[in-house]
Amino acid sequence: MKVIDMHCDTIMRIFNSTEHLAKNNFQIDLEKMKQADYLLQNFAIFLDKEAEESPYQTAKDMIDCFYQEMENNPALIRPVTTYEEIINNQQQQILSALLTMEEGAPLEGKIENLEEFYQLGVRMLTLTWNYPNELGFPNALYWNPDTQRLATQQGLTQTGINIVQAMNELGMIIDVSHGSDQLVTDVLTHTNQPFVASHSNTRAHGAHFRNLPDHLIKKIAARGGVIGLNFSADFLQNSQQNQHLIERLVVHAAHMKKVGGIEVIGFGSDFDGIPIHHELPDATIFPTIEVAFQKAGFTSTEIEKIFYQNVLRLYKELLR
């Protein structure tokens, strides 16, 4: 079964180490991806803006790292910016890599920076990480674990609205993972296009600020968007449950299907951005996940949609 994964932090790991993409001790490398029959991996340029003197420059340096890894392995993986390039790679049995950015701070609120990163190959932008930035507000700082409610009604800023509209014009995919509930609502208001929550689960089955409430799952689905199932144990488990993490993954998927339909579900593992857990250790786990979906009663057609077809459909519509 082919796999498309909408989110990992492997480039950040490589950038901060002496490891490389071909084979490493991380959760994703080319050997593991081949073993699991990957079609495409989104590689995020991730940085903690509070720890960087210049998020803009660090992002550019990490992009250089990404392309160096692509140049080192041209027979195995190639960067893509269009649907046609993905299909061409597939026909040649070559993995595809889509460059994304997790954190809007490198834009510095400037349309010209957005355009520059687009020219450098970035095709998806996670508007916020865990801190407010020029574009909008996250859920992370405003979650009350006792009430399981958010303490902010702040979403996109005016600059964020301008950036979202510019992303639509360019053909860069909007990613609302990490964003506040109001930010997601604001994105729905200010774009008519589908968008993604690249690595988020369901709040109904995981009381965590990074998971989505049902009303937003339903609206993202109605817009034709896709939500990537996140493999973090913190996002998958409710405290009172003791199920295997793969079983929990299936539970979240089943709830997404119930609320928004099968077409809204994809994968966004967050590998190399989450702690290693023996039940979901690395990229080689996908065949085991496929079996779990089969045992849970998902049809082969539904499993194909979750594993790659839903995301591929979205990329065909939006990438250019």
Image (cartoon, rainbow, N blue to C red):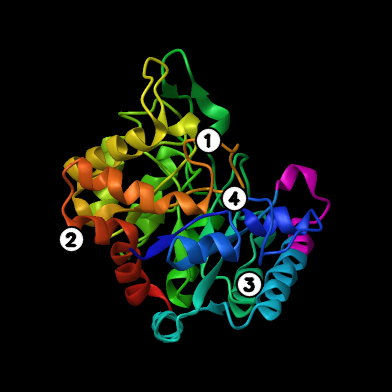
Q: Quadrant of the C terminus?
A: bottom left
Q: Is residue 301 above or below residue 73?
A: above
Q: Amino acid at mark 4?
A: Gln
Q: Earlier in the sequence, mark 3 or mark 1?
A: 3
* Residue that label 3 marks: 117
| Disc 4, SS | loop
Q: Earlier in the sequence, mark 3 or mark 2?
A: 3
Q: Amino acid at mark 2?
A: Thr
Q: CA gap, disc 3 to disc 1?
A: 36 Å
Q: CA gap, disc 4 to disc 3?
A: 26 Å
Q: CA gap, disc 2 to disc 4?
A: 28 Å
* Residue that label 1 marks: 278
Q: Is residue 100 above or below residue 105?
A: below
Q: Residue 27: which disc?
A: 4
Q: Is residue 223 visible?
A: no
Q: Nearer the viewer, mark 3 or mark 1?
A: 1
Q: Earlier in the sequence, mark 4 or mark 3?
A: 4
Q: Quadrant of residue 213?
A: top left
Q: Residue 89: x, y in percent?
A: 46, 83
Q: Quadrant of residue 69?
A: bottom right
Q: Residue 172: which disc?
A: none
Assign the magenta stretch its main secondary structure. helix
* Residue that label 2 marks: 301
Find the magenta span and give its range.
Answer: 48-58
Give me the residue at 48% from left, 32% from top. Answer: 233
| Disc 2, SS | helix
